[in-house]
Amino acid sequence: MAYHRSVLDLIGNTPLVEVSELSPNPEARILLKLEGQNPGGSVKDRVALAMVEEAEKEGRLEKGATLIEPSSGNTGIGLAMVARVKGYKLNVVLPASVSPERRQALEVWGASIIESPGPEGSNGAVRLAERLHAENPEWVFLYQYANRANPRAHYEGTGPEIWRDCPEVTHFVAGLGTSGTLVGAGRFLKERNPKIQVWAVEPPAGENVDGLRSLDDGYIPPIFTELGGPEILDRKTIANPRDSIVWTRKLADVGIFAGISTGAAMAGAIRCAESVPSGVIVAISADGGWKYLSTGAWTDEIDVVVERAKRIIYF
Ligand SMILES: Cc1ncc(COP(=O)(O)O)c(C=O)c1O
């Protein structure tokens, strides 16, 4: 009988699925890597496990230690799962304006939630986490934006898996949040074939697509600059909230139930397909659609969904 010793062994090795039916160019194939298949439901399970294991290796995490993280959603969930399995406590700092599902997902694995002021958004959560860490220096602050284990998880996992499953890849497209996916997997793919083009998908400055951020919004993640992000990225493309929702919805036509940032990545992949004579485009689907049901993205009038997404942080 084949079985896994721990649910943590199920992280990674996610499937690639072809969605070329949606490509505007018959010569440009599009494949999505379904990170929602990870046990905690997103690409961030890879990062959570890598950051915790790195801290363990460095001797920073003693038995029963407490972690603190300001998370825009999926990293908190991945960390909550990993921390629970490994016996650590987790405090997650979240803006008060997040959706109820987000809290509930964290509570599944027993994380404690500390609220930061809603209007200050995710930057306010980062500031509060820094302050709490200064007041409680025994807490371990992994901070995914500056933690090299984040891109390393993609350099050692996501990138090699894409190369193994689709060596024909010509373009790699992913949403940009911390930039860990693009910097890590992008670097790996370019080392194998320097002709592979790496495209980042960002929301317009000042607008929100859950999980993504614009580098023009004033905060550049340290891992992006320190690990050569500007040289790895060949192109940035903008996906606004409306396009992201439209493409999230269209993906259901091919059976894919994915989160809103997958719609953004798909909008980027479509633009890429339109701009090349031919190619094989691999895009990242960072998570599944479950956590976004209350956006109404699949059911409600698109203007209503776009307005709602301005007020509530879903993930
Ligand atoms: C739903 C979702 N999509 C995309 C991303 C972006 O990934 P990365 O942080 O590797 O840039 C994130 C990151 O938090 C996310 O939660």
Image (spheres, rainbow, N blue to C red):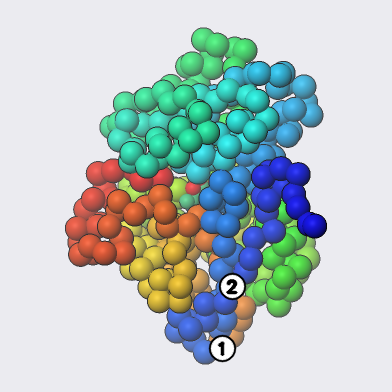
Q: Residues within 10 Å of mark 1 (few under 14, many from 20)?
A: some
Query: Observer-nearest residue: 309 or 78?
Result: 78
Q: Secondary structure at mark 1?
A: loop
Of circles 2 and 1, the one toward us is 2
Asked if 25 appears above or below 38 in the picture, the reply is below
Residue 240 locus on image (x, y percent): 34, 60
Q: Label 1 sits on what residue type?
A: Glu
Circles 2 and 1, Cβ within 8 Å, touching? The answer is no
Question: Which one is earlier in the sequence, the residue at label 2 or at label 1?
Answer: 2
Q: Mark 1 sits on what residue?
A: 27
Assign the C terminus to one quadrant of the image: top left
Residue appearing at x 71%, y 19% in the figure: 63
Q: Is residue 28 left or right of residue 72?
A: right
Q: Mark 2 sits on what residue?
A: 17
Residue 33 locus on image (x, y percent): 59, 65
Residue appearing at x 76%, y 44% in the figure: 5
Residue 112 locus on image (x, y percent): 47, 24
Q: Is residue 13 left or right of residue 284?
A: right
Residue 261 locus on image (x, y percent): 44, 57
Query: Observer-nearest residue: 229 or 131?
Result: 131
Is residue 146 visible to us here?
A: no
Query: Observer-nearest residue: 32 or 1?
Result: 1
Q: Secondary structure at mark 2?
A: strand
Residue appearing at x 45%, y 48% in the figure: 211
Q: In the displayed image of the protein, which residue is found farthest to the bottom?
A: 26
- Distance from Cα at disc 2 to Cα at disc 1: 17 Å
Q: Is residue 144 left or right of residue 162?
A: left
Asked if 265 appears above or below 221 in the picture, the reply is below
Q: Label 2 sits on what residue type?
A: Val
Q: Is mark 1 within 8 Å of ligand 1?
A: no
Image quadrant assignment for residue 250:
bottom left
